Structures are given as structure tokens and as C-alpha cells.
Image (tube, rainbow, N blue to C red):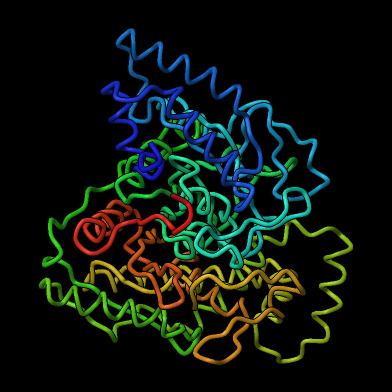
Amino acid sequence: MENLAFASAGELARRLRARQIGCRELLDLYIERVERLDPRVNAVVVRRFEAAREEARERDAELQRGEDLGPLHGVPMTVKESFDVPGLPTTFGFPEHIDNVAKKPALAVERLQRAGAIVFGKTNVPVGLADWQSFNPIYGVTHNPWNLERGPGGSSGGGAAALAAGLTGLEIGSDIGASIRNPAHYCGVYGHKPSFDIAARAGHSLPGMYAPSDISAIGPLARSAFDLELALQIIAGPNVRDGRAWRLELPPPRKAGLSEYRIAVMPSDPTAEVDDAVADEIEKLASWLERQGAKVDRRARPVDPARAHEVYVLLLRAATSARLTEEAREAQLRARDTLGDRADYYAWHVRGNTMSHWEWLRLNNERHKMRLDWERFFEDYDLLLCPTAATTAFAHNPVGERWERMITVNGKDQPVTTQLFWAGYSGMVYLPSTVAPIAIAADGLPVGVQIVGPQYEDLACIRFAQLLEREYRAFEPPPGMV
């Protein structure tokens, strides 16, 4: 039973359908593990155990009658705290929103429930979903199951930690700055950031926010790349309004085996240097792929990395600037007057928060030029492999602003925000990215690879991760969580 807690969602669904285990029995397994292990991890911070048990009884009765709701019938799962679940608060980590109790589910949650999933809790996030750690004044700090002194990443850190610790069967998160990809890398699980806007984000917002954010996407995290495909097929598609007129049909993968791939590899870059503990593992993977017959190019780059990084941070901060209070925006305007020709993350942060619409339009135009450059790049390459972050999971560090915090990269201090480059290089141009675990570093922490593909070729990215899962490395549980 303990080993079953680490099975893929697809395997759990198969066993439930075969009546090898009951829906209530499986749910109770996860609830028992949450109650026993989560005090150490603090991942599943909002719980609806009794309501979930009632739903599990219903799923059992449906199976006894020969009824099957869908591919996740009876599978227990959690969702990121920022998704609406009826009767539960959606706070984004802000104490002032603790009374924001949802009346109806987010569209993605509703689709997963219609496919038979049982949502028994919500997982922790940083305040405003704005950190590569997961802590807030409501629910506290989430720890990485591989090393409780390290963070699990963010902002979908609670979900990745819950998966790694065997506390849930499946998870959905959101990603504007690697918030799915980064926790997957740090916790040794799989994550997929879909092509922009292919999965409707209704019900993933704070009160009064109606316009969808630029760059941001929602997507699945799991212990298997096969679960990523399963979950994406369930949540992808337009909202009810847009669905009156258009449908989504993602193209199937075009490659059957690793030897057919043409792959560009980017283990590090001067724009955001990557520690050897991570870069070396991506290089090892590249060499292994060559031995499998894949064509590997280590020099090809779709667009200038340094310029892409600046454009991304400016657009990112413009996208999140709507959250600023009037007082905070006034402070940012005053700060802008002091910048001069400064060109670093803080300067881009301030300029992004205060830019005019004219400035945004010019940056957006440049972004779309980069999209065309990426399209031409993918005429010659099927995928780009690169890091998600500059290091393995770093120690808890809640002090100061994000750009003031440092991580150690090859013996040197690097602002934690520099590694946002690996989030934005593909993210700001709307491309899909899958993260798959490929190694355990010398420090005992997981290393993941980011698999970037052409827009709407989500299933191609996931298929490559599935091939790596079968032939290179699969998920393994962290010691002490079995």
C-alpha cells in the first residue's frame, strides 16, 4: 500500500477500475500519509477530507454499478491553493483574502472532477504566487521532501512537494515564471507548462480580476510523464464562451523513437550561468541521446539570450503590475526616476511596473518578432533542452526582496532572480515546456531537464519526457518518505 502511494495517476485509475483497490480505501491511504508525514513537509495546507470521503463512496458505488466517469475515476488529487474549490478559501497567500471562499470550482478543477478525480485538498504557495519558495503568513513554510532544509520551489511548490512525498495522486499548478517547471525540477517530479492559453484559466484569480494575465498558463504536475498527457487532455480547451466558436486539437507527436530527434542543447548561458551540478547532468543526457542516434547541436540558439531576458522581465513585471496598490505604484514611479541607465533585474522590475502603453506595445512587437525567430528555429530542430533553474533546490531564504537574495552558482553569488532567464526564454513567447527528472546530484537533490517545443506541440514535449522516463530515468521517491 505504501508503494501504491507513489504510483502514477494512470496506474491508480487502472487499479481502481480493476477493483484491486477501492476509491475510499485509496483516498484513506493518502489522507493517512498526509496526517502522518505532512507535518514535516507542510504541503497540503487546505483540506476537505470528509467531503472527499463522501465522493469516494459515490465513486465506489458507481464502479459497482458498472459506471465510469472517465480516466481519473476515483483518483485522489490536490490542486494549487490559487484554484477555486467550492467551500474552500482562495487566498494566493494573502491574509486579507482568507474569507474569499469559492462558490464554484475553477474550470480546470471542474473538468478533472468530471473525469472522476477526487480533490481532497489544496497545496501551498508563496504570497501572490511570486516566489521560487512556498511560504506565506497564512499557511507557513513548505519544505522539500528530499531535504527539509531546502525549499520545494514555487509558486506551485506545495503541489510538487506533495507529489514527491507520496501525499497525492496528481496536481495542477500555474506558471508565469517557471512556477510549474521550477518545483518539478527541485522536487524530482514531472511538470508541463502548456502553450499559452490552451487551458482556460477561469477560476484561477483573486476577486475583482477578470482579464487573463499575459504569459501565464495552467498545467499539470505528476510522478509520470504519462500522467501529464492524461491530465492535459482533460483540462485543455476553451472556456464556455470561447467554446461556442472554436475547438482545440493538439497535433500528435511526430517522432516514434529517440533516434529520430534533432535536438538543440543549452546546458548554460552567460546570461544566467548554471551550476555544474545541473549543467553537467544535461550534458550527460545530451551525450546519451547522441549514443541513441539523435542529432544533437550544442550551439544553436533561437534568439539572443541577453535581449530575451530583458524583454521577458519587462513583460513579466508589466503583466503582474495590475496587482500593485496605488501607493505601491507611486513608490515605483519615484524609484524609476532614480534608475538612470541602470540595467539589471531591479531596474527592469521597476520599469516593467511603470511602463507606458506605448512602451509595452514596442516590447510586445519585439516579443512577436522573437516568436517568428523561434518558429524558424524549429524548422531545423524538434526540441530545445535546457535547465529550469541554475542550481538544485536552495536553502530556505525568506529575508529581503527576491533580487537581494543570493544562490551559489559554481562558487559565486548569483541573485536568485537571474535564473528567471530559464523561465522566460521560452515562456514569454508562448511555447510549451515539459520538465522531467534526469538525475540525483551529489548533494542528494533532484535535477530536471526542461524540454521546449514549438507552440501547440505540447504532446511532442511530453512524448519526449515519456521516452526519457522509459529509457533514461523515472521518478523515484525521496528517502524517508516511503
371 versus 403 height, above or below? above
Check the image and report above or below for 463 versus 304.
Answer: above
Outermost residue, top side: 65
Residue at image coords 74%, 40% = 207
Q: As drawn, is 368 to the left or to the right of 267?
A: right
The reply, left or right, for residue 231 in relation to residue 209 is left
Position of 52 relative to 470 (above/below): above
Answer yes or no: is residue 70 visible. Answer: yes
Percent x, y of residue 197: 47, 49
Q: Nearer the viewer, residue 19 or 345?
A: 19
Q: Residue at x 66, y 38 (%)?
A: 46
**Residue 456 in the image: x percent, y percent?**
34, 53
Residue 220 appears left or right of 328: left
Occupied quadrant, residue 318: bottom right
| Residue at x 35% of width, y 80% of height | 266
Quadrant of the frame with the N terminus: top left
Across and down, in percent, residue 335 comes to 83, 79
298 or 312: nearer the viewer: 298
Indicate the quadrant where residue 85 lies: top right
Q: Position of residue 87 (x, y in %)?
A: 68, 27
The image quarter containing residue 437 is bottom left
Q: Total number of numbered labels?
A: 0
- Which residue is painted at 30% across and 37% down in the image? 11
Can residue 127 be spotted in the picture?
no
Residues 281 and 193: in front is 281
